Image (spheres, coloured by chain):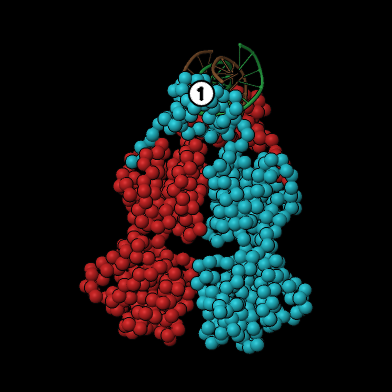
Chain colours: A red, B cyan, C brown, D green
Amino acid sequence: MNATDPIVSLAQVAAHAGVSAATASKALNGRPDVNESTRARVEESARVLGYLPNSLARGLTGARTGTIGVVTTDLDGRFALPILMGVEDALGTDRILTFLCDARGDGLREQSLIASLLARRVDGLILVGKQTDPRRSLGRLPVPVVYAYAESEDPTDVSVTVDNVDVGRRAAQHLVDLGRRRIAHISGEASHSAAADRVRGAAEACATTGHDGAIVSVRYGDWSEGWGRAAAHDVLDADPGVDAFLCASDQIARGVIDSLHERGVSVPKDVAVVGVDNWEPLAVNARPSLTTVDLRLEQLGRIAAHRIQQATSGETLHGVQRVSGELIIRDSTVPRR
Amino acid sequence: MNATDPIVSLAQVAAHAGVSAATASKALNGRPDVNESTRARVEESARVLGYLPNSLARGLTGARTGTIGVVTTDLDGRFALPILMGVEDALGTDRILTFLCDARGDGLREQSLIASLLARRVDGLILVGKQTDPRRSLGRLPVPVVYAYAESEDPTDVSVTVDNVDVGRRAAQHLVDLGRRRIAHISGEASHSAAADRVRGAAEACATTGHDGAIVSVRYGDWSEGWGRAAAHDVLDADPGVDAFLCASDQIARGVIDSLHERGVSVPKDVAVVGVDNWEPLAVNARPSLTTVDLRLEQLGRIAAHRIQQATSGETLHGVQRVSGELIIRDSTVPRR
DNA sequence: CTGAAAGCGCTTACAG
DNA sequence: CTGAAAGCGCTTACAG
């Protein structure tokens, strides 16, 4: 049914309580200069009438509207969601509400979404990209903007993204710590900065620990299971001595593990496997369960929201902040006792 | 930098164009009774000044606010997203914007989110559940409400959900059509109506085609790969003659396929496998790729949005609509030539 | 075709 | 401590 119930205004509450709208407003907003018995009476009236302040009117009066816009190009992907949850978390869900829009990778649509959002007088904008590669800046807007996941090309904008060098470093460091010295790195798409950064981080970790040659091969493909399967076979055909696979995604890692099973190679005894993403349905259910580097996307979302709030309160900061990863150790590198 | 650019009002546009605010409003809103040269002048001024109508003020004036609220309990899951995309799609993204809120399974938080949404005068509310089991009704609200995925207990509410009986029916029908007569149904959690409904649908399909005994065993567990693996071994140990697995989720199906490989059983030659969800990263990358029943969640979202719009324009409808599934045939039932 | 006026629901100085 | 007034930015009858 959902028949439309009447909406009551401040004026009606005021009338019901026998005071002016001004007094009712102050009473309800917890202003100090109101007689406590008056306040009680107004509150009671509001309760009885089921009053819900109209935040459009409130927003009109100036100040904040208590809304922010999140524009993504990756709603179908797995990155936007954790980021959004982090944003909501930091915002304190029911105080500030989030408009979520998907531009579907279309620049024009992004433009018109942003205009719509601005027309609604959002207090800030978070733009979530689908790759970590830098994106075009939107330039100056009437509200604070934060670029998340995909940083802005313009260093004077505010960006928060994943520290993929760190991610690669942690994965490689873990393998080296376990004594692995013949590591094959199965990377993702060569054109993605995420792939290149992780490769660089892995190399760094080996270098700084004095095991420069530990990464014996690096192969680029895509981010899929199928690529992981194929790559594992190729690598082992070429070099049966490999003792670890550092995979640039959990999907790749699943494919690698699959091929290893097929060849009768024991994980992690003979060969250790590390993934990236900590995409739980895949990582936890792998056999053995998958050691992986979590990207901490919720944290990234929380930081983005904080940046908006800081900018709103006048703090002028800029540049790109990179969130480090977190190694999640499971059975594919350290066997369960 | 995102320095705050000035926001210009209708009054400023009007002044710039040398007309009254009333005329400017009409000109910009495409009202017929405006001299075309006046309109052109106003539009030019708006352009020059970068005018963006304040939709808060517009919303105040009455009519619609052009926003709707989506409250979910499943942001981390895989159901809410496709539904949301369908909603946005039907709404025509930049005309009507969507507040997305996650109640995180907390009833109190849901209450307060709804109050927040109502305070923002959303034109409608869509409540997305995480299971298909009926949920408590919110009762009467000042705006139209649609329950999606989890229907409302109250039959006078408006609900849109998955037709799980149909889903089970399609999966079983496909296997029977392929000549399979010893089907093991690996279901999900027995307490979920989605599991029970699919089991019922599968039985129906067999019955109506005269193959009553085709489902030789039904087992309940959870929705995971691990359960699929274990169940496949159990089933084949007990009855090596099984020629098909009907799995209540793609994850279960992946586990089943895994065990089948392990036992040297050929898929689909010896045993066919069907899943449910069409969760692409899993289904497409399975080996062989997985035949599955797509839940058409985007379609569900589109319908939910339409229901809101219908209710908004006064159509009074109620009850629960069930969206049928779609069989996606891949290699796990029909081998590639 | 154009504009002055009133009003949408609130909040904020400003008097009393 | 309370209330009348003005104003936020728009739109909509209503005159002219």
Question: In front here: B65 or B134?
Answer: B65
Question: Up-down: is A297 above or below A58?
Answer: below
**Label 1 amino acid?**
Thr
- Give the residue at mark 1: B38
A181 left or right, relative to B251: left
Quarter assignment of residue A214: bottom left
Q: Secondary structure at mark 1?
A: helix
Q: Which x, y percent locates residue B270?
A: 60, 85
Most foreground residue, B295 or B251: B295
**In this orientation, does residue B114 appear?**
yes
Residue drawn at 60 percent across, 41 percent down: B122
Query: Is the residue A279 above or below the residue A2 in the image?
Result: below
Report the side of A118 relative to B268 (left or right). Answer: left
Is residue B273 in view?
Answer: no
Picture coordinates of residue A291, whole percent (x, y): 41, 72
What residue is drawn where x is 32% and y is 46%? Answer: A154
Looking at the picture, how far across and down is residue B252, in whole percent? 58, 73
Residue D4, located in which quarter of the rendered image? Answer: top right
Residue B309: where, in percent of width, then height?
Answer: 65, 44
The quadrant in which the C terminus of chain A is found is: bottom left
Residue at point 74%, 47% (across, down): B317
B264 lies above or below A60: below
> Which one is in front, A116 or B19?
B19
**Mark 1 Cα shell of 10 Å, populated few (<14), some (14-19), many (≥20):** some
The residue under the point 23% across, 73% down is: A212
Compared across the picture, whether B188 is left or right of A99 comes to right
